[in-house]
Amino acid sequence: MATELKVPTLGESVTEATVAKWMKQPGEAVALDEAVVELETDKVTLEVNAPVAGA
C-alpha cells in the first residue's frame, strides 16, 4: 500500500528540495523510521524516514 511521505520543514528561506537518492526500490520492505529518501537543498542534505512499516 502506498503511503505519503511528508518533507519536514527545511527552514524559512528553503522552498524546494531535490531527491538525491532513493534508499529503497519499489516494493521493497521498509521498517518504521527507516530512511527511504535523501533530499538535497542549496543549504542542507537530509534523510526522510518512513512514517510506517510495510512492503
Image (cartoon, grey):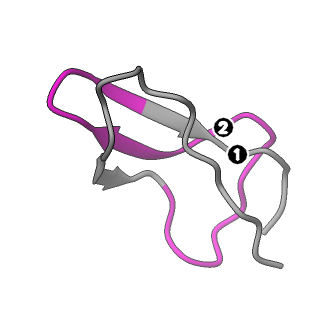
User: Which residue in the structure is indicated by mark 1?
Assistant: 50
Ranked by sequence position, the earlier of labels 1 and 2 is 2
Residue at the image point whose x is 81% and y is 40% from the top: 32
Q: Nearer the viewer, residue 10 or 22?
A: 10
Q: Amino acid at mark 2?
A: Glu
Q: Which residue is painted at 31% across and 52% down in the image?
A: 21
In the drawing, what numbered circle is on residue 34? 2
Q: Return the x and y of residue 9 as percentages of the image width and height.
A: 53, 29
Residue at 55% x, 77% y is 26
From which residue to which does the magenta span run?
24-46
Using the image, determine if residue 4 lies above or below residue 52: below
Image quadrant containing the N terminus:
bottom right
Image location (x, y in percent) of residue 5: 65, 55
| Residue 41 placement, left or right of 15 | left
Helix, strand or loop at mark 1 = loop
Q: Residue furthest front?
A: 12
Residue 31 occupies which quadrant of the picture?
A: top right
Q: Quadrant of the C terminus?
A: bottom right
Type of the residue with mark 1: Ala
Please identify the dominant SS of the magenta region.
loop
Residue furthest to the left in view is: 42
* In contact (CB < 8 Å): disc 1 and disc 2: yes
Residue 45 vs 34, above or below: the answer is above
Q: CA distance from mark 1 to mark 2?
A: 5 Å
Q: Which mark is residue 14?
A: none
